Amino acid sequence: MSAGTYVALLDGGKREESLRVERIAPGLYEVTLRGVTHRVDAFRQDHGTVSLLVGTESYSVQLDERGNGVRVHLRDSVFPVEILDERRARMRRPPGKLTAEGRVALTARVPGRVVGILRPPGEAVREDEGVLVIESMGMENEVKSPKDGKVAEIGVEVGQSVECGALLAIVD
Amino acid sequence: MPERRPIQKILVANRGEIAVRILRTCREMGIRTVAVFSDADRGALHVRLADEAVHVGAGPARESYLLPERILAAADRTGADAIHPGYGFLSERADFNRACRAAGLTYIGPLPESQEAMGVKTSARRRMQGAGVPVVPGSDGPIADEAAAVAEAERIGFPVMLKAAAGGGGKGMKRCDRAADFPKLWQAARRESASAFGDDRIYLEKFLDGPRHVEVQVFADEHGNVVHMGERECSVQRRHQKIVEESPSPVVDEPLRAAMGKVAVEAARAVGYVGAGTVELLVDASRNFFFLEMNTRLQVEHPVTEMVTGIDLVRLQIEVARGGRVPAQDEIVRRGHAVEVRLYAEDPARGFLPSPGKITYLRIPGGPGLRDDSGIYAGWVVPSHYDPMLCRLVAWAPTRPQAIDRMLRALAEVHVHGIATNVHYLRAVLDHPAFRSGAYDTGFCTAFAKELLKPPDPALEPIALIAAAVAAHRRDHERAGEFATRAHAPGSTWASAGRTRAMRGEA
């Protein structure tokens, strides 16, 4: 029978939990979390659904895998988690603190079309003020500056289509 | 009386769930169908469900679904004899309606003259005022320029609503609380309106605080019969987009229903209306009601009326277009309670940003009293060009509390992976005490914004982590099995034994 230790990163890496998983029979596991060992009967029903029995309590858990992470849907809650095995977790450096200092790139959080530039290059902008407007699915969304500063560059034109993650502007 | 216009093949000038909704009724009636699609929609469900499909242009709607000449060319090419416009896109464009008729096609909807009378929201307001129907105070017509608009807003008094003269559905609609915000909202409203309706005219209305949005379904035939089918309550709105609708409205009793129905029928008569239409009303705290606008088309939320009356509104639209008659008013009997929710591709946790992308997994529930009108499937890539609505779920039950509980049950069984949806938000809305009590207004989503965005339940976190860790362990295990298999020469007994073991998940 096999066993492994995993690290679950929560809240975008701000929090972590360690889990020891021991497979004691096909579909039967003992999982130790926060010092408590749970006996778990896990049945993978299809691509995204795992039925868990913990004691007699039945949980239908949805695992929506996205890149490195997984969004775990359970009843009315969604937990974005990244699961690493212990060795890989140790190799990873602690995530650096994200600050809005220096030059900050504004990227598109949704695919869509640039419909307006609110602050042309050279103009001052305050934190939380809109720099550009992107239209996606018929609604307009402002792309806001994360800091007080000046618009150093605008990398797109009005009318241009942009993919998710595209560089839109730089605020200095 | 024989039918005067036999309809044998309908082109559905729309996409997504409404195209699917219309195609289904056509199929039931034995009418052949033509779908149209843009570059972004080749793989869409409506293309698959139609008998024929014609490509009409590029992804952005104004380069495809909003081009009347492309739609007419598609009808000509396929020999369609009727056009159903659905809602949105060209559904409120009198010029398109006229062009269809000029091309010898039956337009499934009202006459272009009625559309013009109601379609320009401002002339509709004037006409209703003339007929003695109370209207919300506002500008007399669309406003030419920004300076004039600011002056008009000051005259009406802030807060005001900026509204698209050409359309509805929350597109091009902005609330403005003070003069300083006006220029930005004015520009945004014009752009949204131009992009959604191909028309950037804007008018102003006084913003009423805490009203309920109640609308009345009307139906008219060309023989002079006009009936109403009761109301729909649509006060649960976010950014002026309806998200939960129900019928009957908890605030409407039989005398009020009769009064509203009478006004709605008068409004339809005043413009010589034929077909399905909706009269939108604002109801204040003292249950006075004001005419807001008349939508000269089917509404997204039409199924709640279908569920309580048992009438297929799309079928009736087609029958009326053929020259048929609407049922008599006393034949329209309402029964039980229906609740509808709109499942949107948007992420409540990220400020409701749209979430287009590939649906990697999808489960939509069934069970007693539930209806699903959707335009999606697992594997479909939701395009960023169009409205984010994925599907409409409707629950029916004998009473309002049962209908709410039924919808809560159904939503708990909805699973969409790959993109974010508002499913948990919808559950929070339905389960909120203010919604359950029925005492809510259009300010509901704003007033309870915090309570409706619940953080994940910490009590469930251990279970979620256990599930994720077990899945990770299982995957590592399967991989180890694969490596073991590959290590052996192909064809050897050991290799096939390893493969069998790996497939059974026992490696």
Image: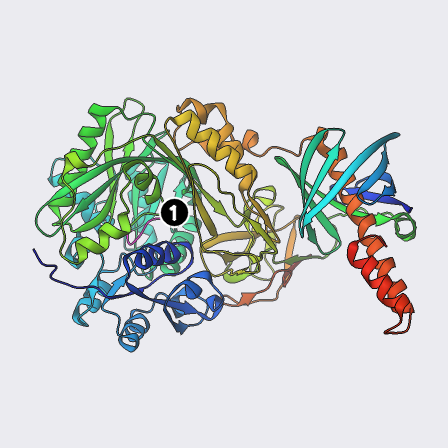
Q: Where does the image place residue B221, in percent across and percent down from the top left?
A: 14, 50
Residue assigned mark 1: B170
Q: Quadrant of residue B64?
A: bottom left
Q: Where does the image place residue A14, in percent across and percent down from the top left?
A: 79, 41
- Label 1 sits on what residue type? Gly
Magenta stretch in the rendered image: B165-170
Q: For the point 41% across and 73% down, which residue is it?
A: B57
Residue B169: say if magenta.
yes
Residue B79: say if magenta.
no
Q: Mainly helix, strand or loop, the magenta region?
A: loop
Q: For the point 89% across and 30% down, which residue is it?
A: A35
Of residue B498 and residue B407, the one placed in the foreground of this image is B498
Please say which color scheme the image uses. Answer: rainbow
Q: Is residue B188 left or right of residue A146?
A: left
Q: Quadrant of residue B156?
A: top left
Q: For the point 59% across and 57% down, which residue is it?
A: A123
Q: Where does the image place residue B224, in percent across and percent down from the top left?
A: 8, 47
The C terminus of chain B, quarter of image: bottom right
Q: Is residue B375 left or right of residue B273?
A: right
Of residue B102 and residue B175, the one placed in the foreground of this image is B102
Q: Where does the image place residue B435, in percent across and percent down from the top left?
A: 44, 27
The N terminus of chain B, quarter of image: bottom left
